[in-house]
Image (tube, grey):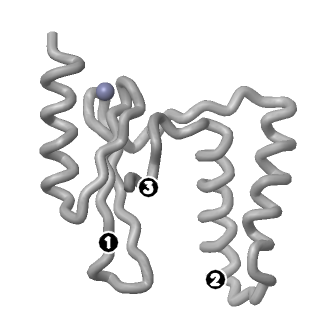
Amino acid sequence: MARYEGPLNNYDRAIDNVTDELDTQAAMRDLHWPEGLTRQLAEAIVSNLDYAFDIRWRPRWVKPGEPHHWSETGEDPDDTLYFTECLACGQIFESGSEASAQTAYQAHRAEEHAG
Ligand SMILES: [Zn+2]
């Protein structure tokens, strides 16, 4: 079963990004916050920002025309999953290998976004 179904929601993605940053900052500062605290803080921060700002996904590190890709590693490094996201339509391709995820994206791009 795919980890991500369809295009990711901007709001949820913002919460995930802020949670990741808070986790990183807490680890760098050797803070031992209770389980789930960074997620709760991220939800509060994003809720507040969303109240006053128009938050949208625009990864500035991805070159125009290129897909967004990332990997996620579970407890076992052999369980690493690779993802390639089509920034034209939001479809996400998931695989146990980076090459396979990119190949699926290239086929999608040729079929859905040619021309
Ligand atoms: Zn697409």
Q: Closer to the N terminus: mark 3 or mark 2?
A: 3
**In this rendering, the label closer to the viewer, 3 or 2:** 3
Please tell me which residue is depicted at 76% across the width and 57% down the height of the picture.
42
Which residue corresponds to mark 1? 80
Q: CA distance from mark 1 to mark 3?
A: 12 Å
N-terminal of the two: label 1 or label 2? 2
> Residue 27 shows which numbered tag?
2
Q: Position of residue 26 (x, y in %)?
A: 70, 78
The amino acid type of the residue labelled 1 equals: Thr
Nearer-the-camera pick, 89 or 68:
89
Residue 61 image-quadrant placement: top left
Between label 1 and label 3, give the one nearer the viewer. Answer: 3
When the figure is inspected, residue 114 is found, relative to residue 6, above or below; the finding is above
- Quote the CA–CA distance across marks 1 and 2: 22 Å
Quadrant where the C terminus is found in the figure: top left
Between circles 1 and 2, the one closer to the viewer is 1
- Which residue is disc 3 drawn over? 3
Residue at coordinates 59% horizontally, 46% vertically from top-left? Answer: 13
- The residue type indicated by label 3 comes to Arg
Where residue 39 appears, x then y in whole percent? 74, 64
Q: Residues within 10 Å of mark 1 (few under 14, many from 20)?
A: some
Q: Earlier in the sequence, mark 1 or mark 3?
A: 3
* Residue contact at pointers 1 and 2, CB within 8 angstroms: no
Q: Secondary structure at mark 3?
A: loop
Look at the numbered disc 1 and give the secondary structure of its residue.
Answer: loop
- Measured along the vertical axis of the image, is residue 32 above or below residue 15? below
Q: Residues within 10 Å of mark 2 (few under 14, many from 20)?
A: few
